[in-house]
Amino acid sequence: MSNDTSQSKARAVGFNHIALEVGDLDAALEFYGQIFEVKLRGRHGKMAFIDFGDQFLAVAETGETHRDGERHFGLVVDDQAKALAAAKAAGAEFLQEGGNTFYDPWGNMFQIVQYSEIQFLKTAPVLESMGLGGLEKSAGALEELRQKGIATG
């Protein structure tokens, strides 16, 4: 992997959305709604779009089920324990007891991470718009951010 920082290459800024395939769109929206506060951005044909702050999750109905191996995405939440308890109550299959990674009914692998514990950072206006204006970072996450020149204090 190259660390070339010249202007000859585009620089990745972040993710706009993640797209998942599910066997049944309505069932998927119901399942995800049991775990997370779901705000539907819209539906179009066999696709639905769920807002997650300033990004979104695109869910496409394929009528098929698959099972991810190592492929997964890390979903940042305000309260990891609540999300994991809700996933367990919704019948999600966990990779290991007490872990933070689970499969949805269509084989998509979710890894749930706590906002306060990672270097992922949202602007104050985005957090405010989500009703999460009081979220804080742990000392470890702040140190990671400081090391990258992203945060001070």
Image: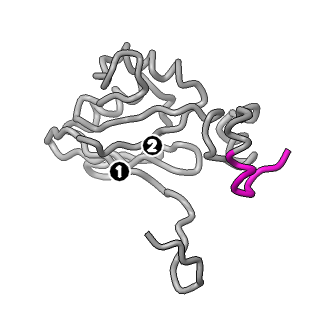
Note whether 127 is above or below 28 in the view shown. Answer: below
Tag 2 residue = 50
Image quarter of residue 7 = bottom right
Residue 83, given in percent of the width and then of the height, sits at: 48, 23
| Left or right: 40 in relation to 53 | left
| Front tag of 2 and 1 | 1
Note whether 13 is above or below 64 in the view shown. Answer: below
User: Residue farthest to the right?
Assistant: 153
- Does the magenta segment cover residue 25? no
Residue 61, given in percent of the width and then of the height, sits at: 23, 45
Circle 1 SS class: strand
The label number, if any, that marks residue 5 in the structure image: none
User: Of residues 22 and 151, which is closer to you in this image?
Assistant: 151
Q: Which residue range is magenta in the image?
A: 144-153
- Characterize the local packing of mark 1: few (<14), some (14-19) or many (20 or more) Cα atoms within 10 angstroms: few
Residue 93, given in percent of the width and then of the height, sits at: 28, 22
Query: Principal SS element in the magenta part?
Result: loop
User: Residue farthest to the left?
Assistant: 64
| Left or right: 52 in relation to 132 | left
| Kind of residue sitting beneath label 1 | Ala
